């Protein structure tokens, strides 16, 4: 029997992961190696230089640049508060005085006598990076990045939208095959700060209701293209997601359409009910190099974890797989044949393939092995 290895989404407990947090410019680190951090703790900080605003001093006073020569009372490097005097011109033997006060707070960057322009740089903008996950600092690159390690329950999705978020795990009392409606969510006492797990999918109304009532994340089986477009507000046409302005970060674990959430995801989430977790919907669709994730760190002696990692990486006949490239992206299938010799595919490339029967319509398809992942 021809066999091979193919990757799959990781859905497991007792997983040791590391996440690198970094700044876009030189800054300073707020932690040291060995320090225990919480997800919302600041681990890096920096200051973004403020923008330079040009004040046309001569124009504002209704004078020529030569008329204000020697009259500007500030110089490069001076700190200014809004309202500070920056230029005073006295004329007609002291009978008339024209003054100009700073319209903003900042630092004098330059003054150009030739055109009477004064440059004031606004105060720096503070920038901070949080830990994202609770764990231990295991590496620090001074002023640029830190690495955090944690042991956790780790659930990857196939696709997601929305950025990093934190919340508390809440498993919905609903069948894995059922679509989550607003009525299901109204039965819950409080959605604020909850990461909702369950259902084959959420209706658009349920997605919006969850976000509007404070839910920080949603983990469900699938989503259809129209609901996704309405939820995000535009057609997803880029290869990387994660920056969408959505009410709650969304992760789908199975694919597109109407697919039940896997029992393993639900069971692991139930073991972590009420625990704090971190999630992100960031997905690199084209290359599959980045997957949305739900990370639930914790004390593994507490009994919340079953330490049953997914170890199957062997592709064989009867394996359950998910297609990760168009035209069957997100669909589930069962492997029926693993040809031992490479075959030519539609693009003209000669690659190793498999034949699998789709769950959706029972059709038998031939697909490159690189285009599937184990479930």
Image: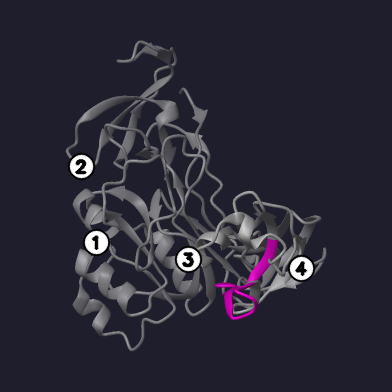
Looking at this view, name the residue that lies furthest to the front. Answer: 93
Between 266 and 327, the residue placed more toward the observer is: 327
Q: Main secondary structure of the magenta part?
A: strand
* Of callouts 4 and 1, the N-terminal one: 4
Is residue 135 visible to us here?
A: yes
Judging by the rendered image, the residue that carries numbered circle 2 is 360
Judging by the rendered image, the residue that carries numbered circle 1 is 177
Mark 4 or 1: the one toward you: 4
Please tell me whether mark 1 sits on a helix, a strand or a loop. loop
Mark 3 or 4: the one toward you: 4
Residue 191 picture location, percent across and down:
36, 81
Q: Using residue 42 as the reference point, say whether residue 101 is left or right of it.
A: left
> What range of the chain is rendered magenta?
89-108
Q: Which mark is residue 268?
A: 3
Neighbourhood count class around disc 4 (C-alpha, 10 Å): few under 14, some 14–19, many 20 upward: some
Q: What residue appears at the point 78 percent right and 67 percent down from the top-left corner?
A: 31
Between 150 and 241, the residue placed more toward the observer is: 241
Q: What residue appears at the point 35 percent right and 68 percent down from the top-left corner?
A: 247
Looking at this view, name the residue that lies furthest to the bottom. Answer: 189
Residue 371 picture location, percent across and down:
40, 30
Q: CA distance from mark 3 to mark 1?
A: 17 Å
Judging by the rendered image, the residue that carries numbered circle 4 is 30
Is residue 173 visible to us here?
A: no
Q: Using residue 269 as the reference point, say whether residue 81 is left or right of it.
A: right
Residue 111 picture location, percent across and down:
68, 56
Quarter of the image that includes the C terminus: top left
* Of callouts 2 and 1, the N-terminal one: 1
């Amino acid at each position: 029997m021809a066999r091979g290895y193919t990757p799959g989404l990781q859905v497991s407990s007792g997983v040791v992961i590391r996440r690198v947090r970094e700044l876009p410019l030189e800054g300073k680190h707020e932690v040291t190696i060995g320090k225990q951090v919480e997800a919302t703790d600041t681990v890096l900080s920096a200051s973004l230089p403020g923008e330079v605003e040009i004040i046309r001093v001569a124009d504002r006073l209704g004078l020529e640049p030569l008329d204000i020569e020697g009259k500007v009372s500030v110089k490069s490097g001076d700190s200014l508060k809004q309202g500070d005097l920056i230029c005073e011109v006295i004329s007609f033997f002291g009978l008339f005085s024209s003054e100009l006060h700073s319209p903003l707070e900042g630092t004098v960057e330059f003054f150009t006598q030739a055109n009477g322009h004064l440059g004031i740089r606004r105060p720096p903008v503070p920038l901070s990076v949080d830990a994202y996950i609770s764990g231990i600092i295991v590496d620090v690159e001074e002023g640029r990045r830190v690495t955090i390690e944690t042991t956790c329950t780790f659930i990857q999705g196939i696709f997601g939208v929305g950025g990093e978020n934190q919340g508390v795990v809440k498993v919905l009392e609903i069948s894995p095959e059922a679509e989550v409606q607003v009525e299901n969510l109204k039965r819950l006492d409080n959605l604020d700060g909850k990461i909702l797990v369950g259902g084959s999918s959420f209706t658009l109304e349920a997605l919006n209701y969850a976000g509007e009532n404070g839910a920080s994340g949603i983990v469900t089986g699938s989503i259809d293209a129209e609901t996704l477009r309405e939820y995000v507000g535009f057609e997803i046409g880029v290869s990387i997601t994660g920056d969408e302005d959505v009410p709650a970060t969304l992760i789908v674990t199975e694919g597109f359409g109407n697919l039940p959430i896997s029992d393993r995801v639900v069971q692991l989430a139930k073991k972590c009910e009420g625990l704090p977790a971190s999630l992100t919907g960031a997905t690199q669709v084209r290359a599959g190099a980045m997957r949305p994730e739900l990370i639930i760190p914790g004390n593994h002696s507490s009994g919340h974890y079953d330490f049953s990692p997914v170890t199957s990486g062997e592709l064989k006949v009867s394996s359950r797989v998910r297609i990760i490239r168009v035209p069957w992206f997100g669909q589930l299938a069962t492997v029926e044949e693993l040809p031992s010799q490479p075959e030519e595919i539609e693009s003209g490339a000669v690659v190793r393939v498999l034949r699998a029967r789709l769950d959706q319509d029972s059709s038998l398809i031939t697909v490159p092995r690189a285009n599937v992942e184990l479930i």
